[in-house]
Structure formats: C-alpha cells, structure tokens
Image (cartoon, rainbow, N blue to C red):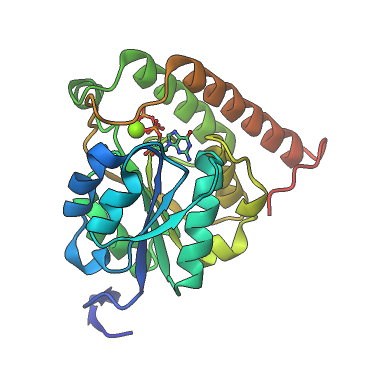
Amino acid sequence: MRGIQLSGIKMVESPHMKTVVVMPAYNAARTLQNTIADIPPQYRADAILVDDASSDDTVAVAERLGVRVIRHARNTGYGGNQKTCYTAALAAGADIVIMVHPDYQYNPKVLPSIVNLIENDVCDVVLGNRIRTRREALLGGMPFYKYISNRGLTLVSNLVTGENLGEWHSGMRAYSRKVLETVAWKDNSDDFVFDTQFLVQCTSAGLRLGDVPIQAKYFEEASSINFKRSTEYGMLTLYTLLRYVLHKAGLVPYRLL
Ligand SMILES: Nc1nc2c(ncn2[C@@H]2O[C@H](COP(=O)(O)OP(=O)(O)OP(=O)(O)O)[C@@H](O)[C@H]2O)c(=O)[nH]1
Ligand SMILES: [Mg+2]
C-alpha cells in the first residue's frame, strides 16, 4: 500500500483497491444515463448492470453507454438481482463492491468518500444516508410515510443491534470483499428484505458499519416501491430483527453466517 504517515495515521495516497460499482436494474431506462454520467470516471470502466428481465430499454441503454450488462432470463426480484451483482463483482476481482440503484436517487458523486473509508480500514460496510435532517429529506421529496417508517425502523434496528446508522434502508451500499466472503448472503431472500438480512448478518459478524450523508432525491421517473410493498418490507424487517433477538438470546437459531 502506498501511503503517507501523518500524526500516526496512515492515509492512502491514491486508490489501489479495485472498486466495482454494481447496479441492480429493473425498468431503469429513463434514469440510467444520468446515474452513469454521475459515476466518477475512475469507477465507470468496471461497472456492472444486472437487468432483471426489464420490459423497457434498460439493456439497450446500458449497452449504448458501454456498461457491462448481465441479463436475467426471468424476473428474480431485487434480492435475487443483488446476488447476481455480487457474484459477478467478486468474479471480476473486486476488492470493494458498491451497489448503486440505477434510478438516479443516490448521487454516485460521493463514491470516492465511501471508497476512502474502506481503503483506510475505517469501515467494512458504508451506506449512503439520506436522512441528515427531516427538513432535507422531506424537501428532497421523500414521502412523509416513508420518512416516518424509515425513522421508526431505523431506530428499532439500531437499538436491537447496537449500531448507529442514520438509516437502514438506503440504496447505496458499499462492502469490502471480506464482507461478501464472510456473510451468507446467497441464502437470503430474493425480495427487498435481502437488504435488512444482509445488514443484520454484518452486525452479527462484528463487521464495522458506517455511513456518509447523501441527498434524498425523489422524482417522477425514479423507481419507488408502493405503499403495499413498503409495508410488506417493513413487516419482514421487523420479523428479521425478531429472529436476530431470539437467536442472540439462544432461543431460536437463525443462520446468520
Ligand atoms: N429485480 C428487481 N428490481 C427491482 C424491482 N423493483 C425495483 N427494483 C430495483 O430496485 C431498486 C430499488 O427499488 P425502489 O422501488 O427504488 O425502492 P427503494 O429505493 O427501496 O424505495 P424508495 O426510497 O421509495 O425509492 C430500483 O433501482 C429498481 O431498479 C423488482 O421487482 N425486481
Ligand atoms: Mg428508489
């Protein structure tokens, strides 16, 4: 590692860890170009998009923009899509894998800050946190019910696990290779609760979680799960946390690693 010694803290001078951005896509044609345009150039060449049998032009747009595309023959769901993303990123030799939703809700310009936290061994997992203040999140267009449920579920998740994340529901998540090789994510749900299961597994493994602030951005073309699916996701998140508590109490085993 090339670095400089500054007051006992080793700072990385230039990135040397291979960073692969993965985008789990489903009908993202309208937002893909903007998302990719904002990915810092040093991460673009290795980016991978996994298309979950979209019915729009997601694949054509991605290919036109020169992004490596992997296609699912049939729709497997958001968690299933991430499984393909991480398998492909590890096979490509990634040291750091960053998931970015291709719906342009998470500004990829912060990627260097996220990478820096992993490269300098401050964190194993870094999330983009859209809720720095209530005012900012709501001004960014986050629906009020999503704001309230995000705060509530995040509070419970932090209390149960002892973490201190700004939000547990972000679509921008970075993992070191060690994380993806430690956690049994292949056994997780193929649906949205995959994300919660993954973080619970990380906390259970003693991995170091942290976050960086990012803008909350909601707009018409962005993908946004509806009230019914959000409620299902919320219930499954609570169920996952309950299983974690029962497991920790030695009552009902829950395979976490
Ligand atoms: N594979 C798959 N991906 C999906 C599906 N629905 C959404 N996605 C992708 O998953 C990402 C997240 O979905 P969103 O609907 O934006 O949900 P969210 O970001 O958790 O919620 P919001 O904060 O409301 O945007 C999007 O970028 C979509 O491309 C699906 O049914 N299957
Ligand atoms: Mg979204």
Q: Looking at the image, which residue is at 52% across and 35% down?
A: 192
Residue 86 in percent (x, y) is at 50, 59
Using residue 247 as the reference point, say whether residue 183 is left or right of it.
left
Q: Looking at the image, which residue is at 40% across and 65% down?
A: 96
Q: Which of 185 and 226 is in front in this view?
A: 226
Q: Looking at the image, which residue is at 21% across and 56% down?
A: 39
Where residue 206 sits, quadrant-wise, is bottom right
Using residue 250 as the reference point, say whether residue 120 is left or right of it.
left
| Residue 89 appears in the rendering | yes
| Residue 189 vertical placement versus 205 (above, below) | above
Residue 42 in percent (x, y) is at 21, 69
Q: Which of 29 and 42 is in front in this view?
A: 29
| Residue 192 vertical placement versus 62 (above, below) | above
Q: Looking at the image, which residue is at 61% across and 52% down?
A: 185
Residue 167 in percent (x, y) is at 39, 35
Residue 131 in percent (x, y) is at 29, 31
Using residue 129 as the reference point, say whether residue 255 is left or right of it.
right
- Quarter containing the N terminus: bottom left
Q: Which of 108 and 134 is in front in this view?
A: 108
The image quadrant where one finds ligand 2 is top left
Where residue 188 sits, quadrant-wise, is top right
| Residue 113 appears in the rendering | no
